[in-house]
């Protein structure tokens, strides 16, 4: 077992009684920092393990994950090239990604 595997960490945190969300890269277009299927586990305190991107995109995903934990409502987030008119947070590498954020329930 890889003790840094976000899926295993999400399960462990959840079994410890933490409220947890899991973010997964659904799709990428062009250059993207992480591959489809990459995961990020986030708890309600903002602790996280894994990666779905980097920089401000990851910060935005963590913030949305805390909202998903509170509401239980799954979200699909899209990020593209940073552009004030299109996205608040973007990728500097020129790619686009879609990320699913869902609450973990065991």
Image: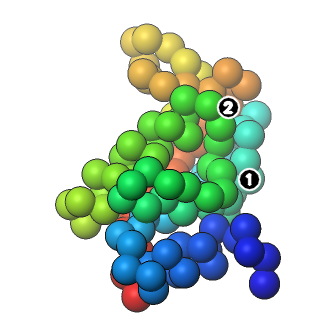
Depth order, front residue of 100/10: 10
The answer to whether 26 is drawn above or below residue 93 in the figure is: below
Vertically, is 79 above or below 74? Answer: above
Evaluate whether residue 73 shows in this view. no
* The residue positioned farthest toward the left in the image shown: 71
Q: Position of residue 8 (x, y in %)?
A: 63, 78
Secondary structure at numbered mark 2: loop
Mark 2 Cα-neighbour bin, 10 Å: few <14, some 14–19, many ≥20:
some
Whether residue 6 sits left or right of residue 59 in the image: it is right
Dot 2 corresponds to which residue? 95
Residue under numbered circle 1: 35
Residue 61: x percent and y percent? Answer: 47, 44
Answer yes or no: is residue 67 visible: yes
Number of the label disc, if any, that sits on residue 79 = none
Query: Residue, x 54% and y 81% (percent of image)?
Result: 12
Question: Which one is in front, 64 or 78?
Answer: 64
The spot of residue 67 in percent (x, y) is 28, 51
């Amino acid at each position: 077992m890889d003790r840094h595997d976000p899926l295993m960490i999400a399960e462990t945190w959840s079994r410890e009684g933490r409220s947890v969300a899991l973010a997964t890269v659904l799709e990428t277009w062009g250059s993207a920092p992480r591959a489809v299927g990459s995961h990020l586990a986030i708890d309600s305190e903002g602790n996280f393990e894994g990666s779905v991107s980097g920089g401000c995109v990851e910060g935005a995903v963590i913030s949305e994950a805390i909202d998903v934990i509170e509401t239980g409502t799954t979200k699909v987030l899209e990020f593209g090239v940073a552009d004030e008119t299109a996205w608040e947070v973007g990728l500097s590498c020129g790619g686009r990604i879609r990320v699913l954020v869902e609450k973990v329930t065991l």
